[in-house]
Image (tube, helix red, strand yellow):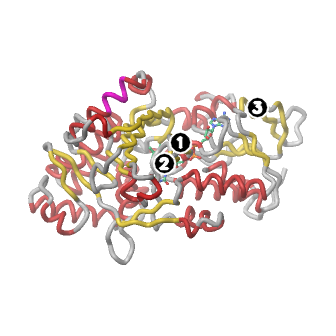
Amino acid sequence: MTGITAAIRLAEAGHSVDLYEARDHLGGLSDAYSWDGLTWDRFYHVVLSTDERLLRLLRELGLADRIFWRQTKSGFFGDGRLASMSSIGDFLTFPFLSLWQKFRLGLGILLCIGIKDADKLDRLYVREWLMRVFGRRVYERIWDPLLRSKLGEARHQTSAAFIWATITRLHGARSGESKTEQMGHVRGGYATILAAIAGRLESLGVRVRIGAPVDAVEPSEGGEGRVKLRSGYGSESYDKVLLTVPAPAVLRITGRSVSDGPYWRALADAHYLGVLCLFVVLDRRLSPYYVTNLLDASLPFTGIIETTNIADTADFDGRHLVYLPKYVSADDPLLFEPDQAVTEALLAGLRKVHPELPAEAVLHTRLFRELHVQPLQEVSYLDQARGIQTPIHGIYLANSTMLYNSTLNNNAAIALAESAVEVMTDHKGAVHG
Ligand SMILES: Cc1cc2nc3c(=O)[nH]c(=O)nc-3n(C[C@H](O)[C@H](O)[C@H](O)COP(=O)(O)OP(=O)(O)OC[C@H]3O[C@@H](n4cnc5c(N)ncnc54)[C@H](O)[C@@H]3O)c2cc1C
């Protein structure tokens, strides 16, 4: 979405743009998967009413009337049972905390969303900060299991800005007048969005080169300030190149390493979480919740996402779509386990939460895995040198290592792409060089 958005904005400003994608289709982490007539996102996606840049892009793509909003519910699983956490009533009867602990939880969340400048959280460890704001007992009962299932051992290095970003984004889902949780998506999922994007790119004259992994970018020999790009399509020369790939690919493509200075060292030091995510099609509804958060750290996934609870069931032909994601460090051996072993472990975990689910209710599963998904915002992340303009003339960068104090989401990716275009065009719309 970062590369696509930058291509659209540059072409709209009148520039000639080529867009390279290694895979045989556009979309990256936002692409779609099809099974038996059901096409939906490979990884789950929601839109929030606070996703201003994304909503603007969707309107520009003519998709405004295809955005579907739904009031959603969240659940928690712990001590062998499920509990709703979707209303004030649920909060008061929430079984996993005492009345005093609930008061601390509510107060802590108010305090957290009141923080406008998250930069000061960059130097604080998430564990210490959460204990201070919510108290030890609430930390141990709620936050520690959630951090464990999302970050594993990496939670010990993560800064408080990570959890602040998560809490404030989720609070955004409650920002409407009703103060109930509302989430949206485009009918047909990202497949609809990507089809509209393909049309837009074509009408703007962007040359889309799919199946074209970029191998190298470097300053052209002989100067003139141009950049040479080598891909499966051969060599081309450009005024400017914007890289929108994860940090390891940036280092490989530019031929830079940790010893080439602080800018490259920051990229080499980026610690990514990867993801394993099981796409599960069921013949029945599992729960009323869009997200089931887990207080039981023995479960093999980070949460349960029941996408059909935010969608119109007619769009799924009576079937139900659930995702079981597991975030792991990019070097975790689990990321390289065979599909069958991971799938069985994830489904066994699902049966722990929903013992009533018979095996025949599972119509289809497909495991997806990605190595470099979300860079961890570790303590003192902001001390490192990062910027859209790389030290190499004519080469620019916009990737998720630059999403400070933010969760990984497409609204942030689009905002970053738009900033990159401003920098590339010198804020005046004219590419120089
Ligand atoms: C499990 C999960 C849940 C999510 N939930 C949400 C959500 O609810 N809401 C939301 O807004 N966002 C969500 N996201 C995040 C969203 O998918 C990402 O923000 C977005 O896809 C990131 O876009 P990107 O362009 O930065 O990176 P990517 O999508 O990773 O794109 C990078 C692209 O570069 C290509 N590439 C790599 N190397 C090369 C090369 N050498 N040459 C050419 N091309 C190359 C890749 O193939 C890929 O297409 C979720 C992501 C995951 C994984």
Whether ligand 1 has any atom under 8 Å from the Cβ at mark 2 is answered as no
Few, some or many C-alpha atoms within 10 Å of disc 3 (few <14, some 14-19, many ≥20)?
Answer: some
Residue located beneath label 3 in the image: 231
Q: Quadrant of residue 377?
A: top left
Q: Quadrant of ligand 1?
A: top right
| Real-space CA distance between mark 3 and mark 1, rounded to the nearest whole angstrom | 29 Å
Residue located beneath label 1 in the image: 34
| Magenta span: chief secondary structure | helix
In the image, residue 330 lies in the stretch drawn in magenta: no
Q: Is residue 15 left or right of residue 91?
A: right
Amino acid at the residue labelled 3: Ser
Q: Is residue 16 left or right of residue 371?
A: right
Q: Is residue 22 left or right of residue 229?
A: left
Secondary structure state at the residue bearing disc 1: strand
Amino acid at the residue labelled 1: Ser
Q: Earlier in the sequence, mark 2 or mark 3?
A: 3
User: Marks 2 and 1: which is nearer the front?
Assistant: 1
| Residue 280 in picture, x, y percent from top left | 39, 40
